[in-house]
Image: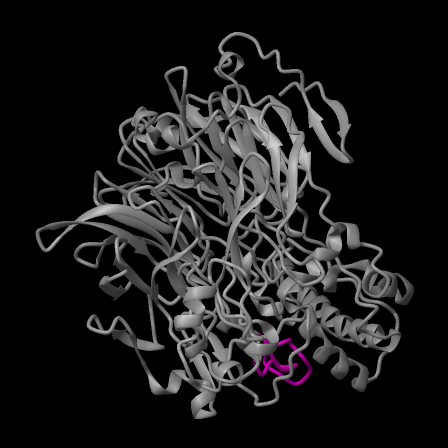
Amino acid sequence: MTRTLLRCVAGGTAVLGLSIGLGAGAAFAAGGFAQVDGKRLISASKEPGSWMTRGGSYYETYFSPLDKINVNNVSKLGLAWHGDFDTDRGQQATPLFIDGVLYTSTSWSKVYAYDAATGKELWRYDPKVPGSIAKSVCCDVVNRGVAAWNGKIFVGTLDGRLVALDAKTGKEVWSQVTVDQSKPYTITGQPRAFNGKVIIGNSGSEYGVRGYVTAYDAETGKPAWRFFITPNPNNQPDGAASDRIHRELGYSTWGDGAWKQTGGGGTAWDAIVYDPDFNQVIIGTGNANPWSWKSRSGNKGDNLFVGSMLALDADTGDYRWHYQETPGDDWDYTSVQPIILTELSINGAKRKVALHAPKNGFFYVVDRQNGKLLSAEKFATVNWASGVDLETGRPVVYEQARYGVTGGDFLAIPGPFGAHNWHPMAFSPKTNLVYIPVQNIPFGYSDDGTFKYTAGHGNWNLAITSAQNGGPGDEPERKIQAMRTEGHLLAWDPVRQTAAWRVNHGGVASAGVLATGGNLVFQGTPDGKLVAYRADNGQKVWSWQGHDAIIAGAMSYMLKGEQYIAVLAGFGGSNALHVPFINAKVGTHGRILVFKLDGKATLPSNTKPVLNAVVAPDTFTDAQVKKGGELYGNCVFCHGFGLHTNNMLPDLRRSPIATSKDAFADVVLKGSRENKGMPKWGDQLTADDAEALRAFIQSRAKLLKRDLEAESKVSRN
């Protein structure tokens, strides 16, 4: 692509833009930019070539009725164009297509706009999120997309702002701080726009925050209403829409415990769906904090409204109904996974339902008029509960799964990465099947009985030892093996609550899903492929090989009679940062990839090289190595258990920085790479601590060097 860039600075915000004279055929030139309103979004089915909101419509089915690309001609699908981002890490957004323009967010909450026909970059926006915020992020510096309303594009930023951008220029219209920025709140989710409002949630449960959602006036940014997921720990009203229901119901579901210090969690970090049929917002709520029910709430109470689907009046935020999927959550079983709204014929009657496949491994069908559970069955391997009692709506939990009650360890499946996580699933009205990206990842839980809340830190309350970090004298490979993923694409019949077909992926991570009217289901892979399957039987009918992992959900749009498929590429997020998927490909930067029939574009490689082990001449004591292994618990969720990583973030065993005492201290204690997302730890670690960490890293680098040399000898022979 040929790009002529013009740098502008407005209001202290860096924006890259282009002149908007885009030539003949630019659909947006005459009609304005992102002129989206409620009438247009409710009537999205009349614009099958557009993709104006998350999942393609208010019903968030991730289904495109377009069928110009179908099972008969998909073999001709090729790359039409691509755009390179200036960020790497996890690319999780699904683009919007509105009147000739593609809008997408990237990691670090940046936003790009492209001419959807040519790939010409129109503008980019950088909210200048400080790199230090990465310290408060459990699962990467990701962003899952933007919203559009009345000529504006909305993005939630990692440091807790909601920003409205001019859809034509990318310049800020307004910016609203939505959280207390002195606390470890973050935003990774996608805003939703409806009725002249835009709503956003937040994340940070593990770090000691209290979750809520806030609706703002889309024109001015003025707050309209707020709903807190958990009660006020100080037993005081918040002056919010949630006050009444917490007074009547919420408080009685919490016992005494650490939730009064942590806020209880419950952050709504992804699933927020506007339901136009009932003028309500349905929110998938997050896990409780700390994870242990015993430490959090004395093994008492359901802890509302964590792990729930929660319906609120769209105009006032007042409580309508809730269905709690994981009462008294003990396992980080969030319910923030995507929610699909549709209508199904159940027992001969049409029911308007919400379809949900959350972390806990059960597929739920819920009446969205009143929150009544209609059915629930296991869609993945589940060992924490035998089933769901349809009379009470409650899971039948195995006794041994309550590790805080029994005082023992529990190896659960699914673990905290979930049987289904943030990855979009899809529902096709042509096949009446839901397509779910499933993953089975075991995880061990144990309440060590010594929990102490530390503000701003990961307050999981799990007995994580140096053995889990790959410390000396342990079996690190056994620990790594326990974290490996088994993944598959599952076609699920939501009426019969049975599997229709599945495609096994082996030990790879999940990726988002798109279904289309061409009897196709598209899904990416960690080794850089985009694959199409027949929607009716799962037969693989097309595959394209790229250079970087594709984990985001794709979308489809129509322009000048031509159908396109668009998806983001870039690895990271959740367990992807710290679990060494063998076939995962990571790049130096993320990308948007756009395909059409007979596309002829080529894609240059952006793959990161894997470096050799680097060992310093320094010597360290066994005591230093042991201490470093214990301190490394602060590092595992970015740099990998046992320092086994997938190359997205630096493999510290291969980093020359870890061979220099001064350079390592500059990074770890002084924050010399904070602008790249490596926060400084000098307020919590001493110089001796940093040297102990370096000792541990070097001990692992020596082992890696030994193993690589042995492999080299074998290959030569």
Can you give x and y, in whole percent of width and height, for residue 225 in the image? 51, 51
Q: Quadrant of residue 466?
A: bottom right
The residue depicted at 75 percent of the width and 50 percent of the height is 130
> Residue at the right extreme?
662
The residue depicted at 47 percent of the width and 29 percent of the height is 97
Can you give x and y, in whole percent of width and height, for residue 434 in the image? 28, 49
Q: Is residue 7 above or below residue 686?
A: above
Display coloring? one colour
Question: Which quadrant is home to the C terminus?
Answer: bottom right
Magenta span: helix, strand or loop, mainly? loop
310 left or right of 258? left
Can you give x and y, in whole percent of width and height, for residue 441 in the image? 44, 67
Comparing 685 with 643, the one in front is: 685
Q: Which segment did they paint magenta? A: 462-476
Q: Is residue 587 visible?
A: no
Q: Is residue 25 magenta?
A: no
369 left or right of 219? left
